[in-house]
């Protein structure tokens, strides 16, 4: 199963770190979460098998993104050599010179290769670490113009996300279950998880990286060392719905954080389990949601946490709805999400929030 | 906890001075000024110590040295002594088998130079002289040059036989070979004196080739044909060998005999260094070895030692080269249908009294370390509660396991996700599964690893008793099964009591009956079984329920069930009139926990 494959129209893209995260944590037992940074041959085996089995839709150009990969297993170059021998043009993105040397490609001098400083984030401090490398590294071919120098995967990912969401936006035209407004569409996240598992997993990995960036430098998410339970106030991921329970489970594995199942808050609120709901005094909590529309359920959970003495650190979600102008959003209340429904795309998604009140026209 | 066999091979301890021959540069174990082999061995034994076992035996299938020089065997004494001391293995629990690299070719040449009339027996003694000295130092007994089967270890119902396959390895090398008559006579003797044991042959040369185009490995072709007939005659099912430097296991072509190579313990380049363990699993009269392969991952990162890190390979990733279970003894299952055809009254009696006492094979999951750890977490976190717990009008108990809290700690959650994987792998469940379903919050959380590891569709559903607490989108399965695409479904949940909740989900019109009507087999995997029956894979089926429980239940008979731990809970003893009869409820003594909304 491959999670990070994108056909950009000009080339096929694979994010090697995301694939390594899947291998290390879900296929093998390396148990380092998103902190794993060494590309294993088993990961390349999966990718090679994907190319052989599922094909590349006729595309013969492949970009391998090495961002966040610090080292590679020996003999991994055989996979790239095989692809080259099968007629594929390859480009490595954000690769260190150290890895190039390990792969045995340090004798290749292609004028299209772009020297650059590759930046990593220290696992402990998240401070940037600089290493010499290439933002683009080609093999021996001439005319390497298929990969734009300024290419970013983010817009491609968002476009894919929007197109996928269109498939799972179901006509609703009922009132919102938690707030006193009407919704024209219901975005069926459960169906999205069921039918787009690979894409959802890639999105959850992206969400984990975002959460880490949000809360590592200010210390709440501590560094992880397997088996060491020294972190005293690491945040706890709070699950409050059936959909979010899946996200919480995967995120716990990726971020190495404990979880709290707060029964059911939204779309229908029911809390049965009155025993041992262990909100711990002064402990940090991150509420995990599938989709945050108006944020009512998040506020309910926030209030429960704070009422019982915990600290609400923030909210993360796969999707958020930006009903306010960006300038009016208060940073600490902002949901960290990998996709936003906002004024640039809500019409295309047929996602409207209405009330019975007259518009001010 | 079970006994384990540790299989290592091809150490190729090499003198780097090249005084007497070429040095092997591709080994971690070497003789070089300033180099110490003990840190490599310590890392290996430190890792092995973590593998739980009751008793362990060590099999070393040859090529201990590289060119069989005395200096290499002197170093081998230090290395093997450290290894068995660290692992606390007695000298009787180690089989040391010579490989072709343990044959000292210069000694053969010298003997031939000394005397043209040197006999084969003379040469056999001189070519193995350094190995024999090493052997005696470690084992405390003489190496038997004169026999082919020179040593043995008994463990459980297994006898491991140490075999010398170097008969025709001479000064110019040579393949594996066993003189047929002599070998058969020796093997026959073992077979007759140990009739109830499964004999496993341990030797150096590979009978099957992973790298060769032919199927003859590095064995004399004609000799192999004769040997295969002998293996068959004496009911040999498994052979452990070395020589290939590639971990693998396979059947000897055209037979049911498994050959297993552990790979090289010290390989520095090319294929990763590796070793194997075989856990001896006995269930009734079934006997098998669970084959686990470990590799030394050379990642060149900052956090590993200079050698890399030992990791256990996931079977799913090496299934093309490794057989997971070496079945040594299997009891054929008996058709259970005969019980169902009996008259109803008698059938009920049989089901209650004899259900798991007839000649039916018990099919249950068992892994003591996992089961013990799971129970330990329950005890330490105090998650087994007493009180009144109600899931519906008819589902009431005096105990409850708080699974939500069990899943809170990230390490416990990781362990539980892996425990589910272990059940799936050990019981060979995943083959032909078309859909995985996590049931309830807890089931959904416990299934995440399975949902990613296996490239199979995944979805989740609320518990049946919580159906009304969810909106229509949460209750939908989101998969159609009109075309019978989903024939085999895996359902993962936290706790199963009598299975009524599952039968409801599957058989009730208002749940997912339409989908499940076209499902041929539903496999249920749970963390806990809290019911009263003896655990077996068929106990959740309607036909196997006691008559009294059948009333109002859904008729579902295609469930196969596996659980990790059986913890019986006390059911509420009051009947339909429990609200008036039970003083706790009647007098509102405040220890009633309802997990549903009363209508």
Image (tube, coloured by chain):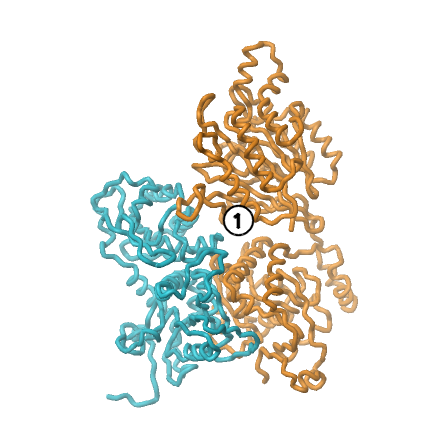
Chain colours: A cyan, B orange
User: Which is more toward the observer, B513 or A10?
Assistant: A10
Residue plotted at (66% across, 62% down)? B538
- Percent coordinates x, y for residue A104 in the rendering: 33, 39
- Percent coordinates x, y for residue A99 in the rendering: 33, 45
- Percent coordinates x, y for residue A89 in the rendering: 29, 46
Place residue B123 in its image quadrant.
Answer: top right
User: From the image, which quarter does the C terminus of chain B lie in?
Assistant: bottom right
Query: Would residue B78 be visible to someone looking at this image?
Result: yes
In the rendered image, the vertical position of residue B96 relative to residue A88, given as above or below: above
Residue farthest along the front direction in this orientation: B34
User: Which is more toward the observer, A107 or B318?
Assistant: A107
Q: Residues within 10 Å of mark 1 (few under 14, many from 20)?
A: some
Residue farthest along the bottom direction in this orientation: A358
Residue plotted at (55% across, 54% down)? B431
Q: Is residue B484 left or right of residue B498?
A: left
The subunit letter for the residue under badge 1 reads B
Q: How many marks?
A: 1
In the rendered image, the vertical position of residue B161 relative to residue B127, given as above or below: below
Residue ID for mark 1: B315
Query: Would residue B236 be visible to someone looking at this image?
Result: no
Q: Is residue A99 left or right of residue A265?
A: left
The residue tagged with tag 1: helix, strand or loop? helix
- Percent coordinates x, y for residue B581 in the rendering: 72, 84
Place residue B92 in its image quadrant.
Answer: top right
Residue plotted at (47% across, 59% down)? B452
């Amino acid at each position: 199963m491959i999670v990070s494959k994108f056909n950009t129209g000009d080339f096929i893209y694979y994010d090697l770190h995301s694939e390594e995260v899947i291998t290390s944590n879900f296929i093998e037992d390396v148990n380092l979460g998103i902190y794993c940074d060494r590309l294993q041959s088993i990961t390349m085996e999966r990718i090679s098998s994907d190319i052989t089995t599922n094909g590349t839709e006729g595309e013969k150009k492949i970009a391998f993104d090495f961002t966040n990969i610090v080292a590679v297993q020996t003999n991994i170059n055989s996979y790239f050599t095989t692809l080259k021998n099968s007629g594929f043009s390859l480009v490595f993105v954000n690769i260190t010179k150290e890895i190039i040397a390990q792969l045995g490609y340090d004798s290749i001098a292609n004028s299209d290769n772009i020297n650059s400083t590759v930046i990593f984030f220290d696992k402990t401090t998240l401070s940037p670490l600089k290493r010499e490398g290439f933002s683009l590294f080609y093999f021996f071919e001439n005319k390497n113009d298929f990969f734009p120098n300024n290419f970013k995967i983010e817009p491609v990912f968002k476009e894919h996300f929007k197109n996928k969401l269109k498939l799972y936006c179901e006509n609703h035209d009922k009132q919102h279950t938690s707030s006193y407004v009407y919704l024209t569409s219901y975005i069926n996240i459960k169906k999205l998880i069921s039918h787009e598992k690979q894409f959802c997993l890639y999105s959850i990995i992206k969400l984990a990286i975002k959460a880490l960036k949000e809360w590592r430098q200010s210390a709440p998410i501590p560094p992880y060392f397997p088996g060491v339970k020294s972190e005293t106030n690491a945040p706890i991921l709070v699950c409050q719905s059936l959909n979010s329970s899946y996200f919480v489970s995967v995120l716990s594995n990726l971020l190495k954080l404990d979880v709290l199942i707060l029964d059911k808050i939204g779309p229908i609120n029911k809390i049965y389990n009155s025993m041992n709901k262990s909100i711990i005094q002064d402990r940090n909590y991150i509420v995990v949601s599938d989709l945050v529309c108006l944020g009512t359920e998040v506020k309910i959970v926030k209030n429960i946490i704070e009422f019982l003495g915990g600290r609400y650190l923030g909210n993360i979600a796969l999707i958020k709805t930006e009903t306010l102008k960006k300038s009016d959003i208060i940073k600490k209340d902002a949901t960290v999400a990998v996709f936003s429904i906002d004024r640039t795309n809500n019409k295309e998604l047929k996602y409207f929030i209405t009330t019975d009140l007259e518009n001010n026209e | 906890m079970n006994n384990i066999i540790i299989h290592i091979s091809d150490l190729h301890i090499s003198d780097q001075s090249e005084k007497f021959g070429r040095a092997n540069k591709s080994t971690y174990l070497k003789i070089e000024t300033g180099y110490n082999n003990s840190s490599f061995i310590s890392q290996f034994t430190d890792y092995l110590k973590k593998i739980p076992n009751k008793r362990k035996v060590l099999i070393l299938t040859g090529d201990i040295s590289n060119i069989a020089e005395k200096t290499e065997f002197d170093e081998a004494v230090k290395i093997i002594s450290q290894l068995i001391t660290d692992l606390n293995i007695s000298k009787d629990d180690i089989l040391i088998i010579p490989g072709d690299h343990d044959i000292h070719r210069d000694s053969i040449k010298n003997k031939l130079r000394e005397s043209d009339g040197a006999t084969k027996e003379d040469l056999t003694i001189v070519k193995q002289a350094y190995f024999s000295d090493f052997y005696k130092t470690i084992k405390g007994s003489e190496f038997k040059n004169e026999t082919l089967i020179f040593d043995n270890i008994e463990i459980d119902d297994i006898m491991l036989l140490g075999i010398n396959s170097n008969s025709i390895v001479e000064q110019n090398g040579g393949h594996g070979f066993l003189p047929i008559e002599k070998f058969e006579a020796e093997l026959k003797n073992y077979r007759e004196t140990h009739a109830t044991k499964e004999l496993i042959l341990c030797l150096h040369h590979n009978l099957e080739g992973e790298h060769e185009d032919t199927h003859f490995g590095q064995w004399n072709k004609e000799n192999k044909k004769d040997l295969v007939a002998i293996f068959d005659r004496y009911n040999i099912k498994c052979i452990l060998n070395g020589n290939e430097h590639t971990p693998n296991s396979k059947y000897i072509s055209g037979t049911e005999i498994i050959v297993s190579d552990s790979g090289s313990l010290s390989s520095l380049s090319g294929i990763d260094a590796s070793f194997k363990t075989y856990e001896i699993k006995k269930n009734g009269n079934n006997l098998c070895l669970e084959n686990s392969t470990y590799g030394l991952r050379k990642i060149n990162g900052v956090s590993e030692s200079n050698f890399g890190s030992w990791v256990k390979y996931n079977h799913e990733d090496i299934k093309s080269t490794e057989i997971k279970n070496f079945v040594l003894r299997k009891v054929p299952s008996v058709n259970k249908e005969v019980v169902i055809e009996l008259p109803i009254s008698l059938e009920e009696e049989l089901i209650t009294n004899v259900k798991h006492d007839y000649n039916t094979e018990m099919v249950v999951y068992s892994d003591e370390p996992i089961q013990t750890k799971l129970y330990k977490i329950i005890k330490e976190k105090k998650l087994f509660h007493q009180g009144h717990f109600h899931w519906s009008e008819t589902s009431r108990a005096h105990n409850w396991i708080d699974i939500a809290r069990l899943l809170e700690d990230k390490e416990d959650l990781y362990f539980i996700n892996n425990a589910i994987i272990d059940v799936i792998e050990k019981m060979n469940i995943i083959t032909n599964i078309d859909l995985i379903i996590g049931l309830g919050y807890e089931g959904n959380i416990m299934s995440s690893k399975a949902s990613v590891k296996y490239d199979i569709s995944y979805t989740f559903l609320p518990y049946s008793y919580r159906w009304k607490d969810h909106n229509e989108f949460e209750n939908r399965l989101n998969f159609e099964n009109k075309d019978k695409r989903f024939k085999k479904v895996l359902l993962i949940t936290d706790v199963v009591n009598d299975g009524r909740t599952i039968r409801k989900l599957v058989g009730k019109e208002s749940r997912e009956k339409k989908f499940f009507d076209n499902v041929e087999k539903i496999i249920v995997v749970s963390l806990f079984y809290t019911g009263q029956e003896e655990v077996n894979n068929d106990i959740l089926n309607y036909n196997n329920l006691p008559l009294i429980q059948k009333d109002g239940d859904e008729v579902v008979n295609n469930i196969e069930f596996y659980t990790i731990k059986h913890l019986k809970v006390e059911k509420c003893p009051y009947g339909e009139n429990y609200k008036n009869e039970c003083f706790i409820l009647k007098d509102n003594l405040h220890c009633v926990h309802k997990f549903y909304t009363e209508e």
